Image (cartoon, coloured by chain):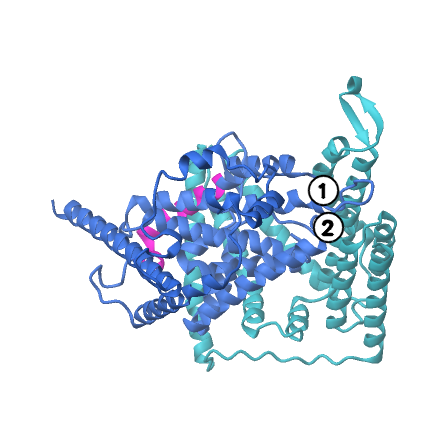
Chain colours: A cyan, B blue
Amino acid sequence: MKSGGLIASTIFGFTRALSHALMSEEIARRRGLLQALDPRVRVIGLFALVLAVTLSRRITVVFALFLVAVMIAVFSGVSIRLLAQRVWLVALVFTGVIALPAIFITPGNVVATFAGGSLRITAQGVATAVLLIARVETAVTFTTLLILCTPWTHVLKALRSFRLPQEVIAMLAMTHRYVFLLVETANQMHESRQSRMVGRLLAAERRRMTARTAGVLLSKSMELSNDVYLAMRSRGFQGDIRILSDFHMKSSDYAGLLLFLCAGGFAAWMGR
Amino acid sequence: MHIPDGYLSPSTCATLYAGAIAGWYAALQRLKRALLSRMVPLISVFAAFAFVVMMFNLPLPGGTTGHAVGVTIAAIVLGPSGAILAISIALAIQALFFGDGGITTLGANCFNMAIVGSLVAYGSYRLIAAGSSIASKRRIVAAAVAGYLAVNAAAFVAAIEFGIQPALFHDASGTPLYAPYPFRVALPAMMIGHLTLAGLAEAVISAGLVAYLQVSDPALLQGTSGIAIGGAGAPASGRAVTSQRRLWLAVGLLMLLTPLGILAAGKAWSEWSPAEFAVAGSQAQAAAAATMPAATIPTGLQRLANLWTAPFPAYAPTFVKSTAFGYLLSAMFGVGFLLSSSLLVQRYLERRRTTRYWG
């Protein structure tokens, strides 16, 4: 890969992360089924459905859960096209590449042979590959729906109400905040480097350049951590972390929670 | 290496969550004892740094590219506890915010990359860089080797997790229910990519970062260097003295408890002596556990059994009548022998180092 292409691909990764975050904020503000529910219900409910997908041993149950995911997406204002492009296609390619050889190498009842009998497709191989792909697609759809329909701050508050240590919640919140600052900084460093490049660099020089960039970013991160700590101290921080939780469950939230748990429990029972 | 949902069975996920929770708890407790208020922003920003470093595409020999995990530099700068938390936080953000890696498999991903990766990186870096100065080139080599080993150790653990799935979780027709490949496929499939690309990327970025820090910010390498601030002859800190005292107390307590061994009935598996092959109970035990007939003494065992006679056979010196006292005496002898050997090796290494510096 050319050095320009390498930097461009890295910048593309940074830009994708930023656009992903902006898109999530925009979808989370829409009116819809998931958005109307308390964030704690969304977190518990969608986690329960992911767990049901993992527990299910029957392909029909996994497909039924996939349909449930599609319906939730439609009623929550999440574009099916967006899901297909950004989630299903990526998961299909990634898991498909991993699952494909299983069709041929899993021992079992031979259903078709190719290349003079050296390549054999088994029923068990097809079943395991389809089950793996369906399970990954369904689980990743539920997770994506949670991410797209819930602002990150609400996810954190929901996690806080599940008695996770306050230090962990604080670190998750701060990391999320500074990821974007550091992504932006790294983006600017790469762009300024690219704007000054003429010709090609050798691979060894490109490796050194990447390590130096990472080193400068590390120094900036450490300075940032010092600044953040001093700012926290100036506001009176003495090690105790308190996070406000202003969520209030309504009767519709309790009904939603019950529905999610019943659906998850029923699917797990049917798929056992 | 980010395992998505659906690849591992619920019981595997639960087991690895339990392992990860134990690691997180231990790391949090260690940091709380240090200075958590200072560590919260430091770990958060470092987690963000690790997240961004994972996006850096690195050109590798062969015309391909790879990306680092950042676990090695985290272990070198923050130590193992800080690295476990920082990388776990980065992985949690990736799973919960970007959908990279599953939610049910978050425990497995943290166990593999954050816990196993951090511990291997820290241990190998400290081992290779031991005794070297902050500016030493050995530290760069140590960081590279630590990065390579850490990523491959994490991949190896992940391969084991994948490999056990078809053997343990399949339906009546033999269809694997989760990751479908047995060890003979999962192990090479995972390791080839990590031994050639991912491990190399982590090695290059870790070595490059340590080389950069040696020049621009050597204080960041001080924390895990093993070199006391103020020179090698500086007095040990109060905390180190306290922990050493605790260690001595624990060793003493364990020595006092050694006679408990005489309460255990039977013989430890595979520790039979030739004489015990003639005893009916041992025969049954050996026959149940092994495929060979237990009634006859294996010829190799018979031949080699008398090659070495222990000074304290069966933890009971011949001149001591009481079994419990024999156990205690054996424990004292064993601990004393190990300590004096360790002191001798340490003295020898120190003398070599002094000779190298002065002459």
Crowd band around label 2 with a 10 angstrom C-alpha radius: few (<14), some (14–19), many (20+): many
Is residue A29 visible in this depiction of the protein? no
At x 57%, y 39%, the residue is B295
Q: Residue A136 at what x, y percent from top left?
A: 75, 49
Is residue B168 or residue A125 the one in the foreground?
B168
Three-letter residue code for mark 1: Thr
User: Magenta segment range?
Assistant: B200-226
At x 61%, y 36%, the residue is B189
- Chain designation of label 2: B
Determine whether the residue tagged by mark 1 lies in a helix, strand or loop: helix
Is residue B224 visible in this depiction of the protein? yes
- Tag of residue B116: none
The residue wearing badge 1 is A95
Q: Residue B48 at what x, y percent from top left?
A: 52, 59
The residue wearing badge 2 is B6
Q: Are marks 1 and 2 in contact (CB under 8 Å)?
A: yes
Residue A230 drawn above or below residue B267: below
